[in-house]
Every structure is written in structure tokens, then in C-alpha cells.
């Protein structure tokens, strides 16, 4: 049986662990409240840029040392940045717990060398260019910008080419010292973990974090202006695009909403990638390549997404078809058979995810960082099983009947 333990250090760092000594591995990760919604215009893309720089050396290790030691431990490691957090994680054998914790902790005190900064700037610019060549990515970015505004949750995680080209290493240092403080960070662990040893080690290794300077907040953005490189048009002209890409957004449940589990079940019934209403009507019939819906939860709000990919000439008709499916669902609710199937899918996914500590890490770390809440696998199973037809019907009326933000990406000559 898994056991949950947590502890807060004097410097504000929180440690949360789901311990199961039956596991053959242990997963560790630092979850930092530093995402694109925390940035200003001059910092746009900095959270993600800084994520890259964490692998570029510390006072104790060169960039080569960091990557070599990660490889030596023989597990899996990586990092990612979202609108609300940056995460650095690794999965190793339990005997390497001390080594991986020391390495990850050291990485969170980067040198931010100016030469590495300039090299990585070019890597980020190439990454932005790569994604700009992918129509779905641009459509989702534009939808977020139009729905939330170009700042806050609508700010691009990668930033823009303009913001990265003008970024200064001094700006990064100030941002690091403001955001990478104990009170903004959770160290999460799952699997075969020695919790007492973990707390003792991290308490010693992070003792100097409290001494980090706290620079003043940067100048506030002008809300009447657009950040450099941002356009708010509802249509994107994608050269050489063979298909049309449609993204629709409306409000959805937050991470603390009581109806978020009903919304997830609703999304499975209406727009799961297999066996849903949209699947049978649009994908199985060959009308569209993709037709799906899902909720995305943030700290204080959420979003409901609808996504459609098809031939440009079929887009108008398919959009109407999708709208009709959503309208009928809001008016009529769902059947008991659909509910049973969706709940079975959700609970099976929870059980399969719980089999590996690495799969549980994000759930444990993110929820403790954002909500200071722990939900075991059994808790999640119980919440899904409690969802009934009325709860799904209420979620459908609430989330499928709101004003939407629409974005269409297609080649200009194929505009629909």
C-alpha cells in the first residue's frame, strides 16, 4: 500500500512523496512555480529558456558532467515547461536515490554562463522556427492568445523570436532569483523512496537557497499594446498546408473545480480519439482526420478545447457537424451505456498509470505545488466512479453552451 508523506523545510521548499516500497524504481522531480503566465513582455519565453540553461553547468559541474552523470545513473530524465510550472525529473533504481537528488538539486543552482546563454539562444530560435512550420501548434498558440489575451495564461511558452532575440542574461538571472526560491518549489518523489533520507539530504543541499537575492519585480507591461511578434487574427495563413486546422476554446473547469471529473468523462464520451460521438460521426466516416474535445485545467480557471482537422473544402460542413454534436449533447445529456464505458476507460487508465512511479510523479508534484493536495490512485478511482449521468449532463450544459474563441489555420488559397 502506498503511503503519502510531506515536509516543509525552513527555506520554504516543500517535499511530497508517495512511497511504495514494492516498486522497483523511484522517481524524483523538482516542480517550480515558474511558467509563461509569470513572465512579462521582456521575459517572454524565459521560463522555457531557463529550463534549457539548467543543463548547462553549475559551480560543481560542467554541462558535459551534468549530462554524463544523468546517463551514468541509467534511468530516464528530462524537463518541461508549461504555462504555470517548470519541471525537472528523473527515474532511477532506488540505490541511486542519493545521487540523483544531489544532481537535480545542484542543477537548480546554474551558473547561467553568458557563452552558454548565447549558444542556447540559437537553439530556442530553431525550436520556435520548427514549431512555426507545424500548423496545429500555431493554431493552439493563437487560440490561447485570443481566449486569455496575449499575456498571462495566453503568453506563449516558447516566447516569440523577437523576445528571444532581445533576451539578456541579466534578465534571466533576475527572473531565476525571483522564481527559484524555496517557497515556489516542490520536490516530489514516488515509488521506492527513503523519505527520511530524502529530507535530510535536501535540507543540507538547499541550505543556501534562502540566501538568493530577491530582485524587484520588472516594470509592468502596457495592457494597451501587443507584445512584439504577436498577432490576434482569427485566421492563420499557413503556406503549403494541405489540410485545414480548427481550434475552438471556451471556459472549462479549474484544478480545484468540483465538476472537473464529470467534465473529463464528458470529454471522453463526446470527443475521445476512439469510440466517442465525434469519432463515429467524423473520423470513422472519413470526413475528418481528427475531431476531439478535452478540458485543460489551470490553477484558477480552465479551458475547454475542440479540435478539428480535415480537407479545407470539408471544413465548413464539419464545423457545423461538430457544433450539432455538442449542442445535442448539451440538450439531451448522455446515455447510461456511454457513461459506463467512459468511467471504465478513466478508471483503467488510472490503474495502469499507477503501475509506474514515473507516471504518478507529475500528478503528485503538480497538485502539491498548485493546490497542496494529494490524491491517491484510490481517491481518483472513487471520484470517477461517483460521476453519474446528471453530473455529466450538468457539465455538458455548463461547458458546451458558452461563447467560443475560434481559430482557423489553412493555406490562403484554400480558405474556407
Image (spheres, rainbow, N blue to C red):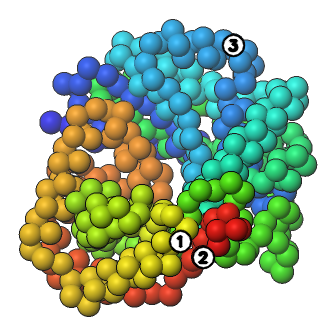
Q: Is residue 187 above or below residue 133?
A: above
- CA gap, disc 2 and disc 3: 51 Å
For image coordinates 71% across by 68% down, the residue present is: 412
Work out whether residue 236 or residue 3 is closer to the camera in this orientation and state it. 236
Which circle's residue, 1 or 3, is located before the other in the chain? 3
Q: Quadrant of residue 268?
A: bottom left
Contact flag, marks 2 and 3 (Cβ < 8 Å): no
Mark 2 residue element: loop
Contact flag, marks 2 and 1 (Cβ < 8 Å): yes
Depth check, mark 1 against mark 3: the one in front is: 1
For image coordinates 43% across by 18% down, the residue present is: 75
In the drawing, does residue 331 fall left or right of residue 255?
A: left
- For disc 2, the marked residue is 416
- For disc 1, the marked residue is 313
- For disc 3, the marked residue is 64
Mark 3 residue element: helix
Mark 1 residue element: helix
Q: Which mark is residue 229?
A: none
Which circle's residue, 2 or 3, is located before the other in the chain? 3
Work out whether residue 184 can be spotted.
no
For image coordinates 47% across by 57% down, the residue present is: 370
Q: Residue furthest bottom?
A: 331
Q: Residues within 10 Å of mark 2 (few under 14, many from 20)?
A: few
Q: Position of residue 275 (x, y in %)?
A: 22, 60
Q: Position of residue 305 (x, y in %)?
A: 46, 69
Q: Quadrant of residue 126?
A: top right
Q: Residues within 10 Å of mark 1 (few under 14, many from 20)?
A: few
Work out whether residue 330 or residue 100 is closer to the camera in this orientation and state it. 330
Amino acid at each position: 500500500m502506498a503511503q503519502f508523506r510531506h515536509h516543509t523545510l525552513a527555506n520554504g521548499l516543500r517535499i511530497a512523496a508517495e512511497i511504495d516500497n514494492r516498486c522497483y524504481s523511484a522517481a524524483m522531480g523538482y516542480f517550480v512555480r515558474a511558467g509563461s503566465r509569470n513572465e512579462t513582455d521582456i521575459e517572454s519565453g524565459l521560463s522555457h529558456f531557463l529550463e534549457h540553461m539548467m543543463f548547462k553547468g553549475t559551480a560543481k559541474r560542467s554541462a558535459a558532467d551534468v549530462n554524463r552523470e544523468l546517463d551514468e545513473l541509467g534511468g530516464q530524465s528530462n524537463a518541461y515547461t508549461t504555462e504555470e510550472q517548470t519541471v525537472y525529473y528523473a527515474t532511477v533504481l532506488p540505490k541511486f536515490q542519493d545521487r540523483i537528488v544531489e544532481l537535480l538539486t545542484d542543477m537548480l543552482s546554474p551558473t547561467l554562463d553568458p557563452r552558454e546563454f548565447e549558444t542556447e539562444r540559437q537553439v530556442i530560435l530553431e525550436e520556435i522556427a520548427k514549431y512555426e512550420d507545424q500548423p496545429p501548434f500555431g493554431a493552439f498558440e493563437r487560440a490561447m492568445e485570443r481566449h486569455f489575451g496575449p499575456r498571462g495564461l495566453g503568453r506563449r511558452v516558447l516566447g516569440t523570436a523577437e523576445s528571444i532575440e532581445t533576451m539578456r542574461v541579466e534578465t534571466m538571472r533576475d527572473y531565476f532569483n525571483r522564481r527559484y526560491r524555496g517557497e515556489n518549489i516542490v520536490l516530489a518523489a514516488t515509488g521506492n523512496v527513503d523519505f527520511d533520507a530524502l529530507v535530510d539530504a535536501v535540507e543540507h543541499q538547499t541550505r543556501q537557497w534562502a540566501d538568493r537575492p530577491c530582485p524587484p519585480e520588472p516594470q509592468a507591461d502596457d495592457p494597451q499594446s501587443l507584445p512584439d511578434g504577436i498577432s490576434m487574427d482569427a485566421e492563420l495563413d499557413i503556406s503549403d498546408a494541405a489540410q485545414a486546422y480548427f481550434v475552438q476554446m471556451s471556459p472549462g473547469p479549474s484544478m480545484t473545480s468540483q465538476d472537473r471529473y464529470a467534465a473529463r468523462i464528458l470529454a471522453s464520451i463526446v470527443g475521445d480519439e476512439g469510440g466517442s460521438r465525434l469519432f463515429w460521426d467524423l473520423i470513422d466516416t472519413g470526413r475528418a482526420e481528427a475531431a476531439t474535445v478535452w478540458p485543460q485545467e489551470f490553477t484558477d480557471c480552465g479551458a475547454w478545447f475542440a479540435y478539428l482537422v480535415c480537407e479545407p473544402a470539408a471544413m465548413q460542413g464539419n464545423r457545423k457537424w461538430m457544433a450539432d454534436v455538442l449542442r445535442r449533447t448539451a440538450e439531451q445529456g448522455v446515455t447510461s451505456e456511454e457513461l459506463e464505458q467512459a468511467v471504465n476507460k478513466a478508471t483503467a487508465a488510472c490503474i495502469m498509470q499507477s503501475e509506474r512511479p514515473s507516471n504518478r510523479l507529475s500528478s503528485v508534484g503538480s497538485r502539491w505545488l498548485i493546490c497542496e493536495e494529494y490524491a491517491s490512485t484510490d481517491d481518483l478511482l472513487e471520484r470517477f466512479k461517483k460521476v453519474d449521468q446528471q453530473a455529466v449532463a450538468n457539465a455538458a450544459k455548463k461547458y458546451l453552451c458558452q461563447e467560443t474563441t475560434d481559430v482557423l489555420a489553412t493555406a490562403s488559397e484554400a480558405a474556407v
